[in-house]
Every structure is written in structure tokens, then in C-alpha cells.
Image (tube, rainbow, N blue to C red):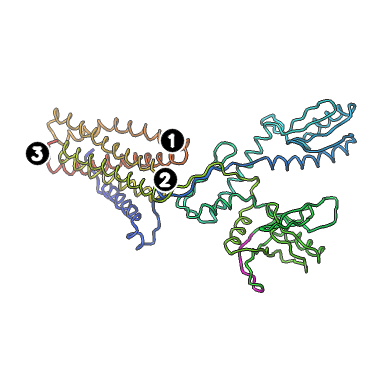
Amino acid sequence: MLYFSKLKVFIIYSILIILLFFSLLNFNSFNNKIPFSQKINLGLDLKGGSYLLLEVDTNPIVRQKLQNKLITLRKDLKKEKIKYYNLHIQNKSIIFEISQNEIQRFDEYFLNKKNIINSYYDNYKSYELDYFTKDNTITITYSKFGIIEIKNLSLDQSLEIVRKRIDEIGTKDPTIIKRGNDRILIELPGLDDPNRIKKLLGQTASLSFRLVSNVEDDFGSELLQVDSTEDKIKINKRVLLSGENLVNARASIDNITGQVVVSFTLDRSGAKKFARITTNNIGKRLAIVLDNKIISSPQISESIIGGSGQITGNFTFQSAADLALLLRSGALPAPLTILEERTVGPDLGEDSIKSGSLSLLIGFLLVIAYMFIKYRFMGIIANIALVANLILLMGLLTILEATLTLPGIAGIILTVGMAVDANVLIFERIKEESKTEKSLIHAFDIGYKKAQTAVLDANITTLISAIILFFLGSGPVKGFAVTLGLGILTTLFSAYLLARHLSSVYVLKNKNKQVVF
């Protein structure tokens, strides 16, 4: 146990030097002189920033899907020659009246044609839609299973689009996770402009192109407000082109007018549609609608066949860039509502860092003093291993570019205690063996071997707890689990490799002397 080959010694100190190098990357004066950019990132509670809890409002999706179901249902009822009256949507339900002698035919139709107006899930034996009959009125609603499916799908899509929007802004190390079946938690450390984030996340960014129309047709028309004004324009309800065909958008300056515009590019299918729209409607006005507000309504003067165009409006460059970002990231499937908002100032985070660092320093110094008083020279070896343990831990956190939170600092402090605990177990075992063993080398060798089981058991059980916390916890709990888990690995390395090697050097040089504990 006390013999170390030259290769093993080389590996031990190479690992220590490499992780020392990465630990030093966290000091700006050192980091600026080399090409490496890894650093330990500070979490929301240390760096300051914004905390947002968002709720996905699925009511508009339910209404939209019911509208689509209604259109399909109307066609199918006509095809089946089932007479119905007053077909409409009310309170998240499709309601219509039917004669008494048609009810049985409708029941057969609903069961036989469930693949048309119902999505059947064989794995769950559940239906997307339910219906019930009262007198001559039939009500079709989404089942509980159908509502859950809509919520899950909307939440997954919203989470992805929120992540795209935040990543495009360049926020460092955001935390974006699910909360329940309809909420999203966002933590943005070091955020300078939380209002901009709220504005970006508060917009659904549903883009559509429709014709300005004063003439009623099969699709009907509606009055929509012009963005940033009180004016309203009557436009056709028919969507000629949607934002789904958009592949890129960016803020730019128009070469002719000098105005800030949003330039966009369409995919192949969208380019064909846009060319057909502009060719068939020359002289008419085309409204560009974002979230039921008209951004602009230019007149079509010529065919546009290149698959690209510009959105004009009363833009600043920042607002144009934000609109381009929204269009690039795609439309949210449902509106997001801010349920909870907290802002942590940098001063509060700085106080947390000072408090955490002071706690670590006090604990560290007390442990060093105790080990020196208790074990004399062997205590010095334990203290060297303790310092190396912190260096190893900081180096690993730097390589992983982990986010350090206040619970993470607590994990580091706990690591200090566990590192000393391992050395105490080993040294106490050596003291017991030295009372019966005449050979000092043999006493140290047996002491390390017999203490190994207790040290491994204690650390492995704690490591299992840290792994469980990491996979089942979230946010700060994960930060604590990461530092604790890595701390256990560095503790075992420093106790059973570094400290043992230093002990072997000391013992072999003093094998004929009395070692005082």
C-alpha cells in the first residue's frame, strides 16, 4: 500500500497540475493571457438576475382545434346526409341540434368514423374527444386525456421556442425547465434588461399575410388594430401565408428610404405562394399581421418571385432586431402568462458570495488548525491533501463550466468536512495498529488497508445520494448535488493517492524513528 511506481506518481501529480491550471482560469488576470475561456459560472443567487415562472395558456389552442374539428364535422355530416341545426362552438364544446331519428345514425357515425374526428390511441385505450346527448342536443368536448395531450404538446413546443428566443439574445447559462404540466421556470443570471426578455416571451409571434378587403366573401372579414395606433383596418380572415414558411429574418436598413426594416426569406413552398399572391393581387394591399395586430399593409405594386421581402413599420433598430428574433425562433403554440417574477440584484449576490466565502474560509482554517494540533506532522500532510482537494474540485467545476450557486458553496463546505473525515479515519486506524505493530511501515500499510472499507462505504453512500439529488432535483438542488458528487471523487483521490503518497515518503524516510501523532 505504501509503494508507488514512478508512473503512478507521475499520473497523480500530472492530474493535480492540470486541474490547478484550470482552477487558475477563474482569476481574470490569469485568464486574459491564455486562449482558454473556461470559468465557473455564478448562479442567479450569486450573480443576480431574473427569475420568471410562466404558464402556458392552452385555451386558444383548444378553441382553434375545435374550430378545425367543426369544419371536418360539418363536411362529414353532409356527406353522411345527417341533418343537423345550429352547429357552433360554445364554452370549449361543439354543440349542435339533431332530430331524434338521426341520433342513432350519428352514434354509429361517431364510432365508425372515429379516425376522422377522433384520434384513437391504442396504447392508452383513450379517446381525444367525448360526446353526450341531451334531448336533441349533442355536445362534443375534449376528453381529459385529450386535454392532457394538448397541454403536454404545447408545453414541449413552448419550452423549445422559449429556449431558442433566450439563446438568440446571448444570455449566459440560462435555466429553462418544466414545472408541472403547464408551467416553465426560467432563471437568467446576470440579466441586464429583464423587461426585454418579458416582452419577447410575452409575444406569441404568430405571423400571417392577409389581404385588406372591404368586400365580404366566404371567409369573412374582421377589423384589426394597426400596431402602435388607434386605427383599425378591415382585412380578410383568409390566411394566404403564415410564419411557418419563414426560414430567416433580420433587421436591416432599406437602401432607398433609409428606414429600419425587417428583411425576411421564405422557404421554397412559401416563395411559390408569395409569388402567386403578389402576382394575382397587384394593386391590392397586403396586411402583415402579428398576434392579431397589423404591422404594415403595403400595396402590391409588382410580382415578388424571389422568396424574400421586407416588413416596414415604425421600427427602431432594437425593435426590428427583436421582431426578427421572434420570427426566426417561430411562433409559440399558446400565449405565456407570467405568474411569478423575481429580480435578484448584483449587490445581494455579492453579499452571498462574501458570506459563503467567509464560511468556507473559517471552516477551512479551523479544520487545518485541528488537524495540525491533533496529528502534528501527519496533520500537515492531511492539510496539504485538503488544499489539493479544493484545487481538484475547482478544476473539475471549471472544466465542466458548472454553475455555482449558494447551495453549491454549501456542497464545497461539506466536501471539506468529508475530506478531513477520511484522513481522520485513516490516521486513527494507524494509531491503533502502531500500538501492536513493531514495524512503522507495516502499521501504516495495515492502517490504510483496514480504513479503506469504512472510507469507501461512507463516500459511496453519499455519492449515491448526490446522484439521486441530481436526477430528481432541479435548480439549486442540482448545483448542490454536482459539487457534493465531484467533491466525493476528489476526496477519495486526495486521501488515497496524494496523502498516501506523501505519507509513504515520510514513513520510509523515518522508518527507524518514532512518529508522534
The span shown in magenta is 248-256
Which is nearer the N-term, disc 2 or disc 1? Answer: 2
Separation of residues labelled 3 and 1 (CA atoms): 48 Å
Instruction: Write down the quadrant of residue 383 in the picture.
Output: top left
Q: Which residue is mark 1?
A: 469
Tag of residue 45: 2
Q: Residue at 38% x, 39% y: name it.
A: 485
Q: In this orientation, does residue 178 appear?
A: yes
| In contact (CB < 8 Å): disc 3 and disc 1 | no
**Residue 271 lies in the magenta-colored region:** no
| In contact (CB < 8 Å): disc 2 and disc 1 | no
On-image quarter of the N terminus:
top left
Above/below status of 223 relative to 143: below
Q: Is residue 495 left or right of residue 222?
A: left
Which element is circle 3 on? loop
Q: Amino acid at mark 2?
A: Asp
Q: Which residue is mark 3?
A: 513
